[in-house]
Amino acid sequence: MTQEFYKEAIQHPIFKLIGETSQELDTDSFVIGGFVRDYLLKRGTPKDIDIVVIGNGIELAKKVASKLKGKPQVSIFKNFGTAMIKYQELELEFVGARKESYHHDSRKPVVEDGSLEDDQNRRDFTINAMAFSLNQSSYGQLLDPFDGLGDLEKKLIRTPLEPGITYSDDPLRMMRAIRFATQLDFTIELKSLQSITENKDRIKIISKERIVDELHKIILSKKPSIGFKLLHQTGLLPIILPELTALQGIEEIEGQRHKDNFWHTLEVVDNISENTDDLWLRWAALLHDIGKAPTKRFHKKIGWTFHAHEFVGSKMVYKLFKRLRMPLNDKMKFVQKMVLMSSRPIVLSEDHITDSAVRRLVFDAGEYVEDLMTLCEADITTKNPRKQRKYKNNFQIVRKKIVEVEERDHVRNFQPPVSGEEIMQVFNLKPSKEIGIIKEAIKEAILEGEIPNEYEAAYQFMLDKGKKMNLKIS
Ligand code: CTP
């Protein structure tokens, strides 16, 4: 056992208090898990702190809380034998050390009290099983029975026990291994990776919410592709996100090939992650091409097509969110909108970039037009430097034009300059389809740049349009 001390890690007075209080209860306590790992990785001192007690975690939590200023509330989770205190910016979770064994067909463990080592044995990874002592005689000592410290240096994800045991105890750990490998840019030990592959189907017993939590963390990492490659390699991806797996592969007919849309997508997600931390925009990048698998066709004359893949893809977003029990709210609608519009700026930039096309883009994308541009710029994955320069340059032009058009025409949150009521009054109409026709014609004229987005011009246009429709001015 190492004899290293990290007193500076546990300088916060709360640690001293916990140590003293557990001594009063004639027991020992330790900080364990993410706090220790992140401290040793120099990722700072996390605000989520896990305390393991050799004894009753709930009792210790209650006693600690009673000594704290303001006597914070203790939330007790009886089923898990844990207790939580929110104190200042900290979230302290207390748990009694456990020795657990699981039944193979369920995740409900049979829990027994255990020693610190028993508890460390049942944790997920060596780097998460390290503890700092809070006990007077060994205050700050690192307790690291599986050489987690060595694994931090080697940048290795390794399980304390045989991987098969650790993963089948809690199959979510397969996702956690991949998530930590992605966040920390670590390697998963080979036998662990093999074990994940063997146990992949057990992910099905895990709740969708917990899986999605891990997916979010992978997506929010600096380089999400690391995680998606591992999910792919272990066979977890087709279980969780079959829509992405379906994009893999290149087909060739009569010498015509299309690109591999799976690997392309991963590049797009990495690209966008350099420019945004927005979780949902990153999801949009991940899903922007999912409609390509079901719409793929080969035509003798034109080669491979993915007709209406954006529309099909946006419908698939709904099904995917529903299946994964993700929120079917504005966030989902945003992802759908991005997928639906994902080719618009590209088509536009390939052509001569006209004001009216830009105006239509701003009108349709509304407040999300910048996000859409960020997505489309990330979508440029060509390895041809000349083409890359050309596309980037074209998008710069589109961006510039968006600003110009916006300043002049204000179509982003378009409000019709002439109201339906006014049209009814002028032509003495009851509610009828004529009003809709005139309103639509005014909108089209503005978007086409035939008239400015102003009241006077729109009013005159309305009069002319009414005349052509043989309407009488009242
Ligand atoms: N743990 C585990 N198996 C799990 C989840 C958690 O063994 N399926 C243990 C690990 O020791 C982990 C600790 O519980 O370090 C706390 O878990 P959690 O708060 O979920 O993760 P952290 O390691 O703190 O990391 P993060 O905050 O990044 O999720």
Image: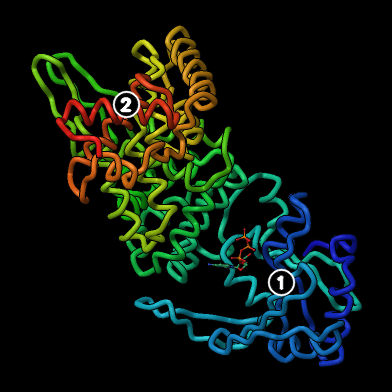
Among the 4 quarters of the image, the one containing residue 230: top left
Residue nearer the viewer, 396 or 187: 396
Residue nearer the viewer, 401 or 197: 401
Residue at left offset 18%, top offset 34%? 471
Residue at left offset 49%, top offset 59%? 213
Quick check: 195 above or below 96? above
- Asked which secondary structure carries label 1, the reply is strand
Q: Quadrant of the N terminus?
A: bottom right
| Image mark for residue 378 | none
Regarding residue 108, the answer to whether it shows in the image is: yes
Q: The residue under label 1 is which amino acid type? A: Glu
**Picture coordinates of residue 277, whole percent (x, y):** 58, 43
| Image mark for residue 91 | 1
Circle 2 residue: 461
Picture quarter with ligand 1: bottom right
- Asked which secondary structure carries label 2, the reply is helix
**Picture coordinates of residue 267, whole percent (x, y):** 45, 31
Residue at left offset 51%, top offset 33%? 370
Q: How many marks?
A: 2
